[in-house]
Amino acid sequence: MILAAGRGERMRPLTDATPKPLLEVQGKALIQWPMQALASGGFTELVVNTAWLGEQIPERFGARYQDSSLSYSHEGRDFGGALETAGGIVRALPLLGEMFWVVAGDVFAPDFLFTQQAVDRFAASGRLAHLWLVPNPAHNLKGDFGIGSVGAALNDAAQKYTFSTIALYRTELFAPPYCAIAPGNAQGVKAALAPLLRAAVDAGCVSAEMYMGQWADVGTPDRLRELNEKKRPA
């Protein structure tokens, strides 16, 4: 699943007429980077949630993008706005499998490899989520989660890192006792992801590892400009 429903308030005025995932980074729409990376790893059934100016995304890509099939969860059309991350994932659960990748459509991580080996390790672990963390950027110096000695994610740690938004999940995370929203979220309940994750971390049901490749949360016009001023190696 690629998260693409946010308003992008901090990116205004760039997002007044364009949804943030369609802003270009180094010659491609932001959302194309995870689309292509997922397809390169063999993951070609993609779900995209939309809200703000959301009609522009299916108008751009339709039901297929290169070798990938695209399904859409139209939160803006169905509920008048985005359902936040957990609410949006629960809304899309009927389109997703028992285990699934999630990545934000406004995060630039061109070096990340989506692999079947990662999925197999996650399946064997029995955990409900596996998170990829990155070194803390200037806008999140305190970080989000630590990593324990056996790879468990930690809420309390001397050293915390930033959650990249890239993760593997099981549907069980989005059910009681962690989430009370019914699969499909027919009522359009808005819900943040962090409380679910932190509760599951406390229960020892979440693992984490570091991703040390290029990563940027493209959250402001300045960050977008900086990325576009950099040249990718040939």
Image (tube, rainbow, N blue to C red):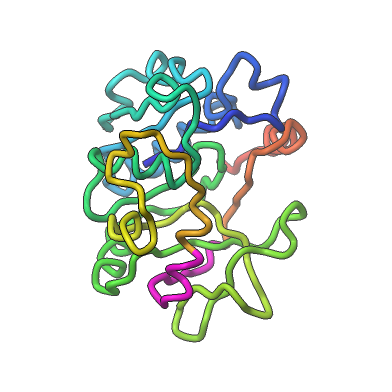
Q: Residue at x 40, y 19 (%)?
A: 77
- Is residue 89 toward the left or the right of residue 68 in the image? right
Taking the magenta stretch, the answer to whether it contains residue 38 is no
Residue at left 50%, top 40%? Answer: 84
Q: Is residue 203 magenta?
A: yes
Q: Quadrant of residue 121?
A: bottom left
Q: Quadrant of residue 26?
A: top right
- Identify the image quadrant of the N terminus: top left
Q: Residue at x 29, y 64 (%)?
A: 117
**What range of the chain is rendered magenta?**
198-211
Left or right, 125 with reference to 178: left
Residue 73, horizontal then vertical, whole percent: 34, 30
Q: Residue furthest bottom?
A: 149
Number of callouts: 0
Question: Observer-nearest residue: 29 or 139?
Answer: 139
Rendering coords of residue 93 (x, y %): 28, 43
Q: Is residue 107 above or below residue 11?
A: below
| Residue name at image x 42 percent, y 56 percent | 167
Q: Quadrant of the C terminus?
A: top right
Q: Is residue 129 above or below residue 31?
A: below
Q: Position of residue 44 (x, y in %)?
A: 27, 39
- Horizontal relation, residue 219 to residue 95: left or right: right
Residue 228 percent coordinates (x, y)? 68, 32
Whether residue 3 is situated above or below residue 64 in the rendered picture:
below
